[in-house]
Image (cartoon, grey):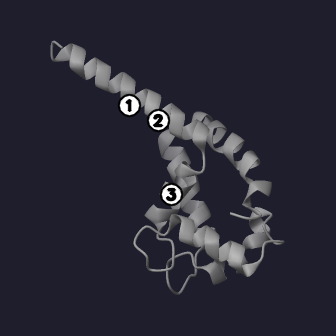
């Protein structure tokens, strides 16, 4: 996605640090706060228009309309043209390879413990 690479490295470095500092519940609260900041208050979702109105908060004021629309499409899992709170949170995790790797390692560790407990 054009233009997004300008901000992605900072974000990728920040989300795992936030998760470590805030814990899982705290991180989810912060993501929910971020969603509320960016959403269209009448529709209760993030649209390309609401993202454009709030782009400066994210340092994305220089992105074109098509780039902002592309960001919404990237996370729009149900194809309605907007991001629900869940879609926004999933997108934030997907955009953070460090956090995804930590989650994968934690899941593997939990599965190994379960297999050991079950006698495998």
| Residue at horizontal 60 percent and vertical 37 percent from the top | 98
Disc 3 to disc 1, C-alpha distance: 19 Å
| Residue at horizontal 62 percent and vertical 35 percent from the top | 21
Look at the image and tell me whether residue 95 can be seen: yes
Q: Secondary structure at mark 2?
A: helix
Instruction: Answer with left or right where residue 115 lies relative to residue 52.
Output: left
Do the residues bearing badges 2 and 1 touch, measured as CB atoms within 8 Å?
Answer: yes
Q: Which class describes the residues within 10 Å of circle 3: few (<14), some (14-19), or many (20+)? A: some
Front one among 11 and 32: 11
Disc 2 to disc 1, C-alpha distance: 6 Å
| Residue at horizontal 53 percent and vertical 45 percent from the top | 26
Disc 2 to disc 3, C-alpha distance: 14 Å
Q: Secondary structure at mark 3?
A: helix
Q: Which residue is mark 1?
A: 107
Residue 100: x and y, percent? 52, 40
Q: Quadrant of the C terminus?
A: top left
Could you tell which of marks 3 and 1 lies nearer the N-terminus? Answer: 3
Residue 27 vs 91, above or below: the answer is: above
Q: Secondary structure at mark 1?
A: helix
Q: Which class describes the residues within 10 Å of circle 1: few (<14), some (14-19), or many (20+)? A: few
Dot label at residue 89: 3
Q: Quadrant of the N terminus?
A: bottom right
Dot label at residue 120: none
Instruction: Answer with left or right where residue 78 lies relative to residue 82.
Output: left
Dot label at residue 103: 2
């Amino acid at each position: 996605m054009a233009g997004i690479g300008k901000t992605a490295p900072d974000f990728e470095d920040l989300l795992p640090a936030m998760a470590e500092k805030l814990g899982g519940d705290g991180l989810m609260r912060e993501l929910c706060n971020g969603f509320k900041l960016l959403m269209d208050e009448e529709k209760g979702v993030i649209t390309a228009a609401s993202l454009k109105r709030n782009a400066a908060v994210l340092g994305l004021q220089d992105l074109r309309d098509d780039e902002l629309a592309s960001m919404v499409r990237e996370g729009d899992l149900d194809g309605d043209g907007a991001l629900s709170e869940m879609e926004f949170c999933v997108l934030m995790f997907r955009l953070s390879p460090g956090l995804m790797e930590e989650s994968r390692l934690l899941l593997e560790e939990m599965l190994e413990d379960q297999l050991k407990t079950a006698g495998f």
